[in-house]
Image: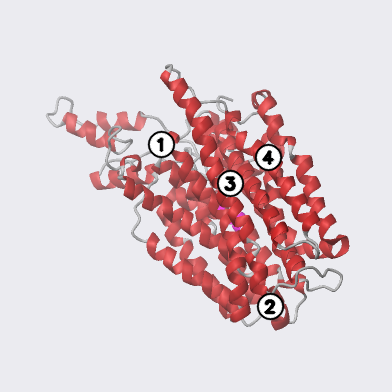
């Protein structure tokens, strides 16, 4: 290639990674310079000055925390302040993902209103989910340049405005476009929420906050139809968008008083206030900034998805599980509302059919509690035991897989349970109860997967691996509802759901195999720390 040349992997290996970054870009972008700039700054003043010590402290404070008790470090904030800043990404993530599914009970009304087929009427759902997958490629660089708060404030508000546009749409094309844009800009919190938790909590205390945040992308879609069903039945489809807007405005009002938590941005502002040079640029000297961002946020995750076996297999696993959840948005109305003559089972109304998603919601909550308990009883206990013996090395990443191994067994149990009990001669509560182990397993596999990827690839490449996982997860999730109706009508409820179950059985060995052979696989990786 002529002109400027930049190889992301070669260059970043020569640079040290930030220790506190977890967003899609922050955990992947290295610090490009060393203490040379600090030495250059301090050497420019007369030696022996009586202000020398004070100047040293001033300049150093613009490069790093002044010590473990630095009051500007979010780790040292009060418990109430940390909880408040932890709630913000979880609340926004819940509203954004709730917005994906609250629309689904009104699909028949939308189809009739705009004179389109039921499959076409699902497009506002699928493009919204697609936006959730691609949006982080925009929001992650914004987070690096202007901080976490900028994403929560600048991205969430336009999402609400596009939601308002969707509610006022008088054409189907306008509805689809507004929903896609609402999902795209609203997904910013999904990209940087984990980074905020890393800013606020030390690793040994981070599991609870991370589990609660990771719960939002599953709990939101599960509760959406439960609420949207009665809204669509009592009002009309536009009120599903007004409902998103109402909760979104409330979440946005709670967001506004927050402070910045990202270390580099805090230090930059401190340096500006002290009128000294701040932290070095994230972009290596001589490298085009736009190209560097594109490499880090898009090219590297895609490369890891196709070249790293750990990323590929776990991403396919979690993406399929997540897609089945979104496929149920089209399947559950077939089972419980029976709109097609060939499938007559329970004959619920729109509101009642939406309530069956609460089974998955209960499963997600139980999965969160199990994930926290697993961390406390196994991972944290082993860590404290090693530290008591003077060994402060982190545990192997495979210690994160216990929850996934449990979840991998629960997924097919829940799917086969639902498949073969969804019959007119079986009470409706029985298949609904089958969705609980599915919800537990889905969350456990996902939560364990993300922690395993971050522990495996470290702060430098861990977020790129997680970004690859998210991109595939939402891309497949957007597609599944489009063929689920046809599949269930052609195969029937039992065999269509069983097909999903058979796939989860085929994918079940992944966490077990990684637990046994993960260390060998990691040794061959070009992206693990030290390579």
Residue beneath disc 3: 367
Q: How packed is label 4: few (under 14 Cα within 10 Å), some, or many (20 or more)? A: many
Where is 40 relative to 367, above or below? Answer: above
Instruction: Please state, as top left, top right, bottom left or bottom right, where the C terminus lies in the image.
Output: top right
Q: CA distance from mark 3 to mark 1?
A: 23 Å
Q: Name the residue nearer the viewer: 395 or 144.
A: 395
Q: Residue at x 43, y 16 (%)?
A: 389
Residue at 69% of width from left, 58% of height from top? 432
Residue 134 is inside the magenta segment: yes
Q: Main secondary structure of the magenta part?
A: helix
**Tag 2, which secondary structure?**
helix
Residue 159 image label: none
Residue underneath mark 4: 314
Disc 4 or 3, which lies upstream in sequence?
4
> Which quarter of the picture shows residue 180?
bottom right
Q: Quadrant of the N terminus?
A: top right
Q: Estimate the x, y position of residue 444 in percent, counting from the top left.
A: 61, 43
The quadrant holding residue 404 is top right
Q: Earlier in the sequence, mark 4 or mark 1?
A: 1
Name the spot of residue 493 as percent of width and height, x first: 81, 60
């Amino acid at each position: 290639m002529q002109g400027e040349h930049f190889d992301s992997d070669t260059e970043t290996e020569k640079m040290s990674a930030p220790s506190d970054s977890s967003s899609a870009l922050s955990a992947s972008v290295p610090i490009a310079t060393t203490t040379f700039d600090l030495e250059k700054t301090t050497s420019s003043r007369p030696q022996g000055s009586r202000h020398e010590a004070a100047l040293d402290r001033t300049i150093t404070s613009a490069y790093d925390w002044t010590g473990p008790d630095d009051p500007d470090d979010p780790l040292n904030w009060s418990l109430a302040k940390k909880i408040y800043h932890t709630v913000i990404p979880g609340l926004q993530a819940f509203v954004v993902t709730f917005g994906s599914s609250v629309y689904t009970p009104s699909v028949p009304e939308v189809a009739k209103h705009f004179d389109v087929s039921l499959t076409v009427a699902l497009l506002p759902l699928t493009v919204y989910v697609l936006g959730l997958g691609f949006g982080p490629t925009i929001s992650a660089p914004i987070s690096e340049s202007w901080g976490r708060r900028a994403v929560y404030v600048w991205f969430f508000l336009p999402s609400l405005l596009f939601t308002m546009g969707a509610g006022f749409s008088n054409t189907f094309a306008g509805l689809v476009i507004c929903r896609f844009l609402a999902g795209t800009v609203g997904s910013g919190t999904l990209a940087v929420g984990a980074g905020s938790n890393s800013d606020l909590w030390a690793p040994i205390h981070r599991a609870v906050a991370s589990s609660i945040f990771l719960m939002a992308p599953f709990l939101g879609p599960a509760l959406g139809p439960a609420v949207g069903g009665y809204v669509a039945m009592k009002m009309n489809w536009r009120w599903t968008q007004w409902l998103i807007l109402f909760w979104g405005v409330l979440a946005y009002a709670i967001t506004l008083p927050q402070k910045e938590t990202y270390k580099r941005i805090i230090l930059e502002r401190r340096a500006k206030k002290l009128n000294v040079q701040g932290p070095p640029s994230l972009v290596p000297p001589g490298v085009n900034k736009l190209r560097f961002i594109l490499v880090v946020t898009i090219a590297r995750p895609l490369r890891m998805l196709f070249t790293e076996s750990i990323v590929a297999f776990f991403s396919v696993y979690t993406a399929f599980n997540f897609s089945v959840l979104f496929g149920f948005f089209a399947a559950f109305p077939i089972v419980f509302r029976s709109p097609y003559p060939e499938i007559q089972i329970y004959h619920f109304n729109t509101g009642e059919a939406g309530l069956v998603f609460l089974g998955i919601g209960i499963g997600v909550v139980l999965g969160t509690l199990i994930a926290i308990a697993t961390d406390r009883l196994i991972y944290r206990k082993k860590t404290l035991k090693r530290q008591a013996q003077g060994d402060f090395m982190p545990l192997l990443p495979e210690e994160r897989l216990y929850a996934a191994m449990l979840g991998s067994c629960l997924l097919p149990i829940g799917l086969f349970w639902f498949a073969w009990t969804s019959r007119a001669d079986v009470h409706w509560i029985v298949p609904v109860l089958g969705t609980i182990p599915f919800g537990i397993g889905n969350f456990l596999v996902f939560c364990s997967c993300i922690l395993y990827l971050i522990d495996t690839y470290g702060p430098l490449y861990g977020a790129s691996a997680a970004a690859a996982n998210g991109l595939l997860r939402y891309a497949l999730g957007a597609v599944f509802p489009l063929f689920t109706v046809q599949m269930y009508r052609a195969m029937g409820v039992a065999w269509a759901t069983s097909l999903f179950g058979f796939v989860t059985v085929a994918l079940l060995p992944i966490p077990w195999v990684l637990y046994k052979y993960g260390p060998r696989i990691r040794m061959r990786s070009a992206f693990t720390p030290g390579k």
